Amino acid sequence: MLWRILIFVWLSVWMVVALLFAPQVPVLHETTRVLYFHIPAAWIAVLALGWGMLHSVLYLVKRDLNHDDQAAAAAELGVLFTVVATVSGSLWAKRMWGSYWNWDPRETSIFFVLILYIAYLALRGSIEGDEKRARLSAIYSAIAFVAVPFLMFVVPRMYEGLHPDPIINNRGKVDMDPLIRICFFMMLIGFTALYFWLQTLRVRVTRLERRRELARGI
Amino acid sequence: MSASSLRIAGVEIAHRFGPRVAVRPVSFDVSAPGVAAVTGENGSGKSTLLRILCGLLRPSRGQCVFEVDGRAVEPRRRRLFTGLATPELSFYEEFSAAENLAFAAETRGLPNPTSAVRLALERVGLTPRADDRVSAFSSGMKQRLRLAFAILHEPPVIMLDEPGSHLDDAGRAVVEHIVQTYGPKSLVLIATNEPREMALAERRIELSGRGLERTA
Amino acid sequence: MPNGGSNSAVAVWSVLRKECRTEWRTRYGLNAALLFAVASLTAVSFAAGRLGNRTDIMAALFWIVLLFATLASMSHAFVREVEARTMLLLRLVATPTEIAVGKLLFNLLFLLVIEAVTVPLFMVLMGAPPVRWGQFLAVLGLGTVSLAASSTLVGAVIAQTRGRGALFAGVSLPLLLPVLAAAVGGTREMWAANSVAPSLKLLGAYAVALLAASLLLYDHLWED
């Protein structure tokens, strides 16, 4: 409860500061604002992917269904944040590059992440039995883990890049306004907290569902 | 057959498939040589228990001890010491009986597959039909083939799940003969509710499942 | 050990021979796959017409045909066992890894047969310019290993789901996209007379990564 309020206040305050007080980046103009939720959402999409895969591997090692609950929750939330990142990015791309979709490296990566999540969830949906579902989907998650570096870094680089690197990279050279930077990192922290809060909620729901199932069975 | 000592014990073994209870907690301790019957109503989990004992299935709860010569055998290696004949076992329909057994013998790495296959087929009375494809087999003949599969590698544990199903009198005699042959040197587990088969066993593992009874 | 200590190489070889014999006797798997490959090849060739010097498009079409043939047929090896309910027999005579490696080798052979038919047919139907065979076969070979490795693991998983083969294509696709990208790239460079080394490195690294992960994961495939 406390967390919920804290995250809500934090995100609201920094969103207001970001939208009202932070300056615009020269080329991006008004679209600068997408920065404050598009990139954090994309970051969560990748974080959830890593979190899910970590717990999949842990499940195979320890055979504890709690790890599977974590992996499943991460995938469901991952889809949510991936869609947020993709849609906001796509709208922005229409404004800046003239079309919604360009197979730019980052667009390609996020597209891979999305189909990976969808395939994983489709697989989960078609397996009966908790242990079996946990085991088989963990196997898939683990093999996908091998594919991820290729999908996210190697293959997308084979296409031409359009993304505004300097702003995302903060290589230091290109001046990013201090206030923009602060707002951006505060949003990043806020989104991360939001994700982990949602994650614990989802896992709790799964556990309650399982307990109800068991109670009904005996 | 070597004179290896063998012991199988269960400590509060229980299993459930999701919300459905398959095996209620059961404890027992049996060792070779000997014949033990696993009994219980339909649905009390006799087949599931056998799958757990031979390492195919991880029990939800409890401990399963499987020792050969005093050393514990991990679940994955138990199949090497076990011959399992269960109604769930199907064979390749496009192969003959002999080819199916030869595949099993070769994959298991038996030193002399051909003679092992010949001997097993002889024991269950399938020699005349050895080269017929399994797709042409009656259910009784398939049951005999399952028995042959179980004894093919001369295992120290033989698990027979409903061994008399589909069998005629001659077939039941084959079951009895197998139990009498292997009982004195190996451990034979028979999952059954048939009085005639239960009589072959000197020990009993009783499953207390509620069977078909609907539980709230 | 009294019961014939299982020798993995013997078991793998035995599973592979069994697969080949089953395929030879029933033949519906290979026939269906060949028919599908030839049908999609015909459709592509018919729809695209003669592409002449557009070797970049040709490279893409070639791998799409091969990818589709894989997606359409490669779940077969495990689905067949599940449908015939022979998985129990198999699990009793071999370890999960031995079974999966045997199937992997069979899937490799299966793909090679499909390629032996589709490659010459593709070159003739599409009017492809001369091929530099050494480079082309290297790309094809490494791509094939990745296709087979991915299909074997996903096929084993998918055969245990409710829909059996139904999800195979969808679930395989994310794993096969790197293969598609690198193999198309390599084939294009081969025709453009550029170096295929970067594509080969990528394909090789991916094949090795998939095989290594598979060998670790095979052990968990069957437990109930």
Image (spheres, coloured by chain):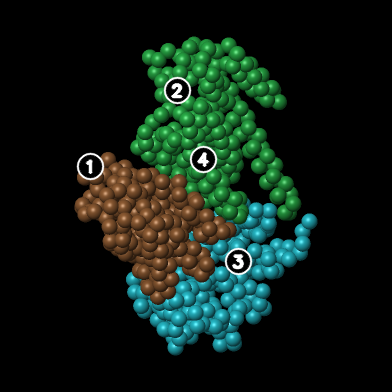
C185 with respect to B69 (left or right): left
Task: Give the residue pinned by disc 1.
Answer: C195
Q: Chain of mark 2?
A: A
Camera-side mark, 4 or 1:
1
For chain A, give the colour: green
For chain B, give the colour: cyan
Residue displayed at 41% across by 34% down: A105
Residue that extends furthest to the right in the rendered view of this protein? B216
Task: Give the residue pinned by disc 3.
Answer: B47
Task: Give the residue pinned by disc 2.
Answer: A168
- Lower sequence index among marks 2 and 4: 4
Quadrant including the C terminus of chain A = bottom right
Type of the residue with mark 2: Ile
Quadrant including the N terminus of chain A = top right
For chain C, give the colour: brown
Q: Is residue C24 visible?
A: yes
